[in-house]
Image (tube, grey):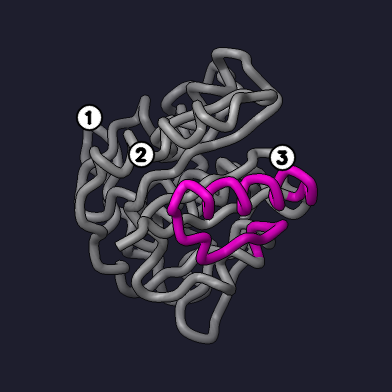
Amino acid sequence: MAPSVAIVEDDLALRSGLSRGLREEEFEVCLSVTSGTALLRGLKDPSPDVFVIDIGLPDVDGRDLCLALRARGVHAPVLLLTARAGITDRLSGFHAGADDYLPKPFHFEELVLRLRALLRRSGQAAEPPPGLRLNPAAHEARCGDRGVGLTPTEFRLLAALLARRGEVVRRHSLIAAAWPSGAIVHDNTLDAYVVRLRRKLDGIGQASVITTVRGVGYSVV
């Protein structure tokens, strides 16, 4: 069976070229969209086998979109495309849950080889976690029919915790995910953001979802 791929790229010419080329390479292009919102609306079960996501989307940072996918329990590999080639940008992509990173411009053959390598390494997707759902375009958390708006930093922090539900996420990992610019952030700043996040989640009945593991970090149950 041909591996399925979802492409999220707002450059029409590039997106069309990728779709055409990947079909010729015997991939099934199950989604080809221009925004993160369109991807999340179009996702079906099972999810695609691999994602190609541009960082510079019109409605959302591709890294936040990757975080939202991981928070939904989607573990298919993600290849990020970007015109930014700095080490800080690459590291922030990996902290967001991406599996690979390809700077623009790139050779199509390299993209294909990277996708095939990702597919060889990928495992089975986990079941989507219950409860909270994230909207990266609106920076919103929802539970059932209730929602609450988050700041970009609060969104990334919650997404990083949801992506590793049931695990204890260390402070340095949360800081790297929530502040992708590489800013120096102290533990007390992180703690203050968690307090604010819990207060907001209380409005949708989810205040107790984040637990503190003293001396280590935080966890989502």
Where 207 falls versus 130 (above or below)?
above
- Residue hosting label 1: 215
Q: Residues within 10 Å of mark 1 (few under 14, many from 20)?
A: few
Q: Residues within 10 Å of mark 3 (few under 14, many from 20)?
A: some
The verdict on residue 39 being magenta is no
Q: CA distance from mark 3 to mark 2?
A: 24 Å
| Of pointers 1 and 3, the one earlier in the residue sequence | 3
Report helix, strand or loop for mark 3. loop
Q: Nearer the viewer, mark 2 or mark 1?
A: 2
Residue depicted at x 73% and y 43%: 14
**Amino acid tagged 2:** Arg
Q: CA distance from mark 1 to mark 3?
A: 36 Å
**Amino acid tagged 3:** Gly
Q: Is residue 81 left or right of residue 194?
A: right
Report helix, strand or loop for mark 1. loop
Residue depicted at x 44% and y 43%: 78
Report helix, strand or loop for mark 2. helix
Q: Residues within 10 Å of mark 2 (few under 14, many from 20)?
A: some
The quarter in which the C terminus is drawn is bottom left
- Residue hosting label 3: 56
Q: Is residue 166 left or right of residue 111?
A: left
Q: Nearer the viewer, mark 1 or mark 3?
A: 3
- Residue hosting label 2: 116
Q: Is residue 189 visible?
A: no
| Of pointers 2 and 1, the one earlier in the residue sequence | 2
Q: Is residue 55 left or right of residue 102?
A: right
The range drawn in magenta is: 10-37
**Amino acid tagged 1:** Gly
